Image (spheres, rainbow, N blue to C red):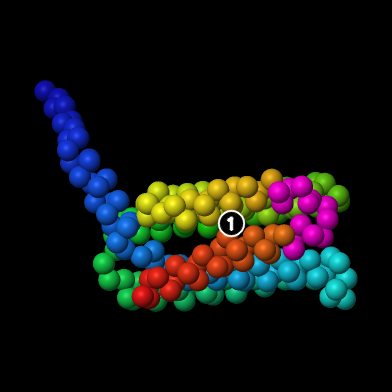
Amino acid sequence: MMTEKIEDPAGDIAWMRRVAEEGRQGPMQGASILFGAGVIYGLASLGHWAVATGVAEFGMETVNVIWLGATALFFLLLIATLTRLKRNRGVVTSANLASGTAWASVGWGIFALAASMAVLSWRLGGEAAMVVLALMPSMIMVFYGSGWAVTAAMQRSKPLWILAIASFAAAPLLALLVGQAEQYLAYAAALFLLMGLPGFLLMRAARG
C-alpha cells in the first residue's frame, strides 16, 4: 500500500518566515568576492578601452592578455576567499546559503558562457567573432542582475532590488555601444557601480 506524502503548510510558512528573518538579521557573506570581481574586471575593461582607443599604445592582441590575466587574478582571490570563509564559517543562515548558491551559479554560468563564446568565435572567425564577443558585457550584466535579484529576495532588501534592476537595464544599454570602444568604458562603470561598490558596502556591513 502506497503512503501519500503529507504536506505541512504551516511548516512551509514557518520555514519561509525564518528565511525572511535571517535575511534581515544576517549580513551577506562572501561579499569580498563580489567586490573583487567588480574591481578586477572593471580595471580589465578600462584596460580594454585604453588599448582600443590608443590611450595605451599596445596592439589589440594585448586585450586577450588583459582579460586572461584578470581571470587568473580573480580565481586566486576566489580560492583565498573561499578558504577563509570555510575556516571561519560560523553560523550559516538559510538566506546566506541561498544567496551563496545563487552567486556560485552565476559564476559557473558566466564561465560556461565565456567558454561557449570562445568556441563560437573560433568557429566563426573574423568580424562575426568580434560581434559575438562584444555581446559578452550585456550577457554578463544579465547574470549579475539575476544574482542580485535572488539575493534581494533572500535579504528582503529594496536597495539590492535596485541593483538587480539596474544590472538588467545596463545590458541593452551596453549593447547599444557594440562596435565602439566606449562600450568598455561604460562596462567598467557598470562593474564598479553595480558590483565593486555594493560588494565593498556589504563587506563593511558584515564586519560591522
Tell me what residue is drawn at x 84 percent, y 65 percent.
52
Position of residue 37 measured from the top left corner of the image (x, y, whole percent)? 57, 67
Q: How crowded is mark 1: few (under 14 residues within 10 Å), some or many (20 or more)?
A: few
Position of residue 146 measured from the top left corner of the image (x, y, whole percent)? 51, 48
- Whether residue 104 is visible, yes or no, is yes
Q: To which quarter of the image does residue 114 belong?
A: bottom right
Give the residues drawn in magenta, as a range. Answer: 173-185
Tell me what residue is drawn at x 65 percent, y 51 percent.
170
Q: Nearer the viewer, residue 127 or 28?
A: 28
Position of residue 12 measured from the top left corner of the image (x, y, whole percent)? 22, 40
Q: To which quarter of the image does residue 197 belong?
A: bottom right
Q: Nearer the viewer, residue 111 or 157?
A: 157
Position of residue 73 measured from the top left corner of the image (x, y, whole percent)? 60, 74
- Whether residue 117 is visible, yes or no, is no
Secondary-structure class at tag 1: helix
Q: Main secondary structure of the magenta part?
A: helix
Q: Residue furthest front?
A: 158
Residue at the spot of label 1: 111
Q: In this view, does 71 lie above or below 113?
A: below
Tell me what residue is drawn at x 18 percent, y 41 percent.
11
Relative horizontal placement of residue 92, taking residue 35 as reference (left or right): left
